[in-house]
Image (cartoon, rainbow, N blue to C red):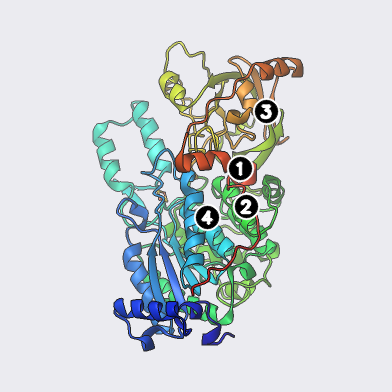
């Protein structure tokens, strides 16, 4: 246990130097008397609220509840507005800015007089960004997940965000619904504050955070608008204060076993493929060498128990009522590491005690899983020497072993221009190939990976094709989409060498992705290949392009993806 003089913030506020005098004076300027804050743990509340982010619209109010908890526990809360990464609105993709928010998080925690932190996020990249930065800063920190939005509704149907957006857009393109129906759908798809309520990247990563022990137990599935969410926020603020006194730093929670349990959790949820990239990046900050192969190995022994869209039938609201993540994890204790510490101060196993499942169709039993093996596979072969990923659970089964002729698109613009060209030589057996969409080429590895089915095939009833790219895919998307091909085409990965008509083999059971072109011909093409010009000449984009790593390494910046000390600022 720490004493007030041991607090990091004491160096700013407590001494007898000119600068300490100045800091106390300026805190009086903020309207506080010394007895209100001196000697108390200072808790930074890093809030990704913004007017542009519908998933976080409640976080401004929620920060007040966190502050309430901090005050009540004898701390001093300070809110910091940090960059919001709004999945829907930020272009070309918030993934370009994940590392920027991670850097901002780390440097705010390092440069201000903070003893601990509450991190508030949920919309896709905000969760890994905040946690990556906090892992590097190393203070006591816990995460307040934004919580999923309520179920969507249209007429008598339940709608899932993302998943039903793609589905009904395809229905409209196929002429099955018209503008009037689409207008109704626009009203019903997203009805409340909160992140996407399917098992997309947001639900996947907030659940992973809970499984790692970085939230209060049961936090991730609480709907954003439920009063339990307000109480969880206040309790998190109070807990952050206690963590400071206990010196419960984030590095004591983020051990290798926590990452292993995050992988198990993501797989049992049927979670987003984006989790591979984010967890690898987070592990890099913890000095733990996680690789895509770790996910593939785990996938063969972890069953999918969460019956949640896009792979299942229900939504996060149903999952919460069925027992939430604690319920699901209570069925997997044999695969988890129960003795490790969590931010609650209790062991992981202790936080799962008394967890119950109230609906066996939403959270399946081990005897009746959604799938006996998890739905993610890591592929290798001459087309992906450093790996590629497919979420085969949501793909047409007859495409999981397939050889077909390539139809190649140079980049997303080329794809949009030609995908419905009547002369495009595409059939149901074709393999659509999109390059120029990786970490550098995209830039930012946008979620282009669910390439659209050409209209004329849709009209014939074709709903899936083998699609290959160096892009990512939204966790709410589906189909036989091979993603994260590494190395990417923009740095000369083999995807750059594919030509129209080349045969490509996808063999998911064999974990193979092969270009059926002999090595001599590939060497000739490689010799002729010209590297595309870099997209950014200056600024953050240039920094990003010079330092981002490939998908198999988590797309972090090389200079951030390592452990090591930086000097503590001297506040005198
Ligand atoms: Fe924010 Fe989906 S758009 S989580």
Q: Earlier in the sequence, mark 4 or mark 3?
A: 4
Where is mark 2, residue-wise? 561
Where residue 373 appears, as percent x and y from the top left, is: 66, 48
Q: Give SS at disc 3.
A: loop
Q: Earlier in the sequence, mark 4 or mark 1?
A: 4
Compared to 338, does 168 lie above or below?
above
Compared to 75, does 472 lie above or below?
above
Crowding at dot 3, Cα within 10 Å, few <14 / some 14-19 / many 20+, comes out as many
> In the rendered structure, are the residues bearing label 2 and label 1 in contact, judged by CB atoms less than 8 Å apart?
yes
Tell me what residue is drawn at x 40 percent, y 81 percent: 21
Q: Give SS at disc 2.
A: loop
Instruction: Determine if residue 70 is in view.
Output: yes
Mark 4 and mark 3: span between their CA atoms? Answer: 29 Å
Where is mark 4, residue-wise? 128
Point out the frontmost of discs 2 and 3.
2
Point out the frontmost of discs 4 and 1.
1
Q: In the rendered structure, find residue 383 and report the number of the disc placed on it.
A: 3
> In the rendered structure, are the residues bearing label 4 and label 2 in contact, judged by CB atoms less than 8 Å apart?
no
């Amino acid at each position: 246990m720490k004493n007030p003089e041991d607090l990091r913030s004491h160096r700013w506020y407590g001494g007898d130097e000119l600068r300490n005098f100045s800091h106390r004076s300026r805190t009086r300027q903020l309207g506080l008397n010394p007895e209100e804050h001196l000697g108390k743990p200072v808790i930074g509340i890093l809030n990704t609220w913004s007017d542009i982010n519908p998933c976080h619209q409640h976080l401004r109010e929620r920060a007040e509840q966190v502050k309430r908890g901090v005050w009540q526990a004898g701390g001093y809360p300070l809110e910091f507005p940090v960059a919001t990464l709004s999945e829907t609105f930020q272009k070309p993709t918030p993934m370009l800015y994940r590392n920027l928010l991670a850097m901002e998080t780390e440097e705010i925690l390092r440069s201000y007089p903070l003893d601990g932190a509450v991190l508030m996020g949920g919309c896709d990249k905000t969760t890994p960004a905040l946690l990556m930065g906090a892992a590097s800063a190393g203070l006591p920190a816990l995460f307040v997940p934004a919580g999923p939005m309520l179920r969507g509704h249209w007429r008598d149907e339940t709608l899932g965000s993302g998943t039903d957006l793609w589905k009904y857009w395809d229905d409209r393109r196929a002429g099955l619904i018209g503008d009037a129906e689409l207008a109704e759908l626009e009203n019903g798809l997203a009805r409340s504050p909160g992140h996407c309520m399917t098992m997309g990247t947001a639900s996947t990563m907030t659940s992973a955070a809970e499984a790692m022990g970085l939230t209060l137990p049961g936090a991730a599935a609480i709907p954003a608008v439920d009063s339990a969410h307000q109480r969880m926020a206040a309790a998190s603020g109070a807990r952050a204060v206690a963590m400071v006194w206990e010196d419960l730093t984030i590095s004591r929670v983020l051990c290798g076993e926590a990452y292993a349990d995050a992988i198990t959790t993501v797989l049992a949820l049927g979670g987003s493929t984006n989790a591979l990239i984010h967890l690898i990046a987070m592990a890099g900050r913890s000095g733990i060498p996680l690789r895509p192969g770790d996910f593939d190995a785990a996938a063969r022994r972890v069953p999918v128990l969460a019956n949640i869209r896009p792979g299942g039938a229900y939504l996060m609201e149903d999952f919460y009522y069925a027992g939430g993540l604690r319920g699901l994890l209570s069925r997997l204790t044999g695969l988890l590491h129960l003795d490790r510490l969590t931010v609650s101060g209790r062991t992981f196993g202790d936080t799962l005690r008394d967890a119950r499942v109230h609906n066996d169709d939403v959270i399946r039993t081990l005897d009746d899983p959604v799938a006996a093996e998890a739905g993610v596979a890591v592929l290798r072969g001459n087309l992906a020497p450093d790996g590629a990923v497919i979420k085969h659970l949501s793909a047409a089964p007859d495409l999981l072993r397939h050889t077909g002729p390539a139809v190649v698109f140079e980049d997303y613009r080329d794809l949009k221009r030609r995908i419905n060209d009547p002369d495009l030589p595409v059939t149901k057996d074709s393999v659509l190939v999109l390059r120029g969409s990786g970490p550098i080429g995209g830039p930012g590895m946008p979620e282009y990976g669910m390439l659209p089915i050409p209209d004329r095939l849709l009209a014939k009833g074709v709903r899936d094709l083998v699609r290959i790219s160096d892009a990512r895919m939204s966790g709410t998307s589906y189909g036989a989409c091979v993603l994260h091909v590494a190395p990417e085409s923009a740095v000369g990965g083999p995807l750059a060498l594919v030509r129209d008509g080349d045969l490509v083999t996808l063999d998911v059971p064999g974990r193979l992705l092969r270009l059926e072109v002999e090595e001599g011909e590939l060497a000739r093409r490689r010799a002729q290949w010209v590297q595309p010009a870099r997209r950014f000449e200056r600024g953050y984009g240039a920094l990003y392009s010079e330092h981002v790593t490939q998908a198999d390494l988590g797309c972090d910046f090389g200079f951030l993806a390592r452990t090591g000390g930086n000097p503590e600022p001297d506040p005198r």
